[in-house]
Amino acid sequence: MANFLDTIFPKSCAICGKKGSYLCNHCKKLFKRALPECYICRKISPDYKTHYECKEERKENSLNHVFVAWEYNSLSSILLKKYKYNYVQSISHTLIEIFIESIKNSTFDKKLKGTLLTNVPLAKDRLHERGFNQTTEIAKRVAEVFNIPFLEDQIIRKDSYGHQSLRDKDERKEIKEGTFTLRNSLSLDEFSSITILDDVITTGATLEAISLVLRKNVSKDTEINALCLFRGRPYYSETSESGSGTPTSPPSSGSFGNSTSPASASSRAVSTSW
Ligand SMILES: [Zn+2]
Ligand SMILES: [Zn+2]
C-alpha cells in the first residue's frame, strides 16, 4: 500500500520540496533540539524539571516537568502551518515520527511510565473550522508507541481563543479561570502522572489552566507533566528580538544550587541529533 501511494504521490520534503522524503536531511538538521529546561524560568534543568522555587511563584497550577522537542523557528512555523491548516497525511506522519524519536532520545521517556496521556482541546468552532485537532493525532501515536493510555476529549475548552501566534502576554489574558473543564469526574488516582500534549508552548498559561482543573481530581503526589513539540527560544538567548514581549524576570542567578547557569545563545544552538 505504501509503495502504491509513493508512486501516485512521490515523496517530497514538506519544507523545501526536494524529492525523496517528506522531510529531507537538510531540513531535518535545521530543527534545533530544545535543551531540557524549567519551563518557568527557562534555565537549563535536568529531566525538564520545574524548579521548586519557580513552582512556588506560580502556585498550585504549575506543572512538574515540561518536555519540548524543538526550538520554534521560521522552518517549524512553515511545517506546522502546513500540518495544521492544510492537513496532509504525509506531513503529519513525518512530524509525529520525528517527535517520537526526539522523546526517545531524551530522558523524558522515563516520565511516560505509568502516565495517562491527554491533550489540549480545541474550542468547538476551531475544531469545526479545521476538521481535526492535531494534538489528538499526535497523542494517539505517542500513546501507541509508548504503550500508555490516552484519554481523548476529556478536557473541554469553553471559549474560543486567540491564534497560537499571539504574543505571550495575550495568552495569559485569553485563558481565564473556567476556560477548561473535565468531561466527567474521572478517577485519576491510579496514574502516577498525567501528561498533557500540546504542539506549541508560549508562556505555559494554557497548560497551567488545564493543570489547575486536573489537580482537583488527582492526589497530591500525582505529577502533571507536558509534552510539547515547539517553543520559542528563551528570552535570554534572543539577540534580534530582545525587548519584545513581556518576559517574566528570572530568579536571581545562583539560587538553584549547582544547576547550570543560563546558556549563552551560541551554546544553545546545538544541532539536533537524530
Ligand atoms: Zn527539505
Ligand atoms: Zn525555574
Image (cartoon, rainbow, N blue to C red):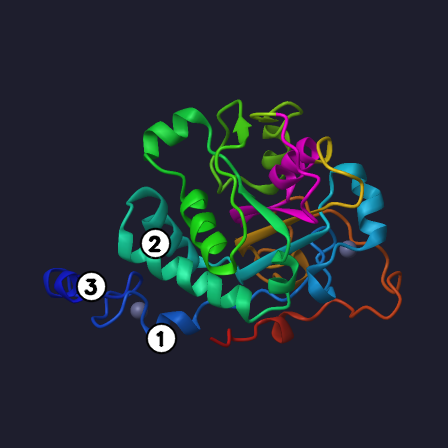
Going by the image, does 167 lie left or right of 137? right
Q: Which of the 4 image quarters holds residue 129?
A: top left
Q: Residue at x 40, y 62 (%)?
A: 97
Quarter of the rendered image showing ligand 2: bottom right
Q: Secondary structure at mark 1?
A: helix
| Pointer 1 residue Cβ closer than 8 Å to ligand 1 | yes
Q: Position of residue 78 (x, y in %)?
A: 36, 55
Q: Position of residue 162 (x, y in %)?
A: 49, 32
Work out how far the residue at label 3 is from the one at label 1, CA to CA, in angstroms.
Answer: 24 Å
Region in magenta: 185-214
Callouts 1 and 2 close, C-beta under 8 Å? no
| Mark 3 or 2, closer to the camera | 3
- In the rendered structure, does residue 206 fall within the stretch colored magenta? yes
Q: Which residue is mark 2?
A: 92
Whether 121 is drawn above or below 82: the answer is above
Q: Nearer the viewer, residue 217 or 96?
A: 217
Q: Position of residue 262 (x, y in %)?
A: 74, 66
Magenta stretch holds residue 173? no
Q: Nearer the viewer, mark 3 or mark 1?
A: 3
Note whether 114 is above or below 219 in the view shown: below
Q: Is residue 218 above or below residue 46?
A: above
Give x and y (percent) for residue 172: 64, 34
Q: Which mark is residue 2?
A: 3
Work out how far the residue at label 1 is from the one at label 2, CA to CA, in angstroms. Answer: 19 Å
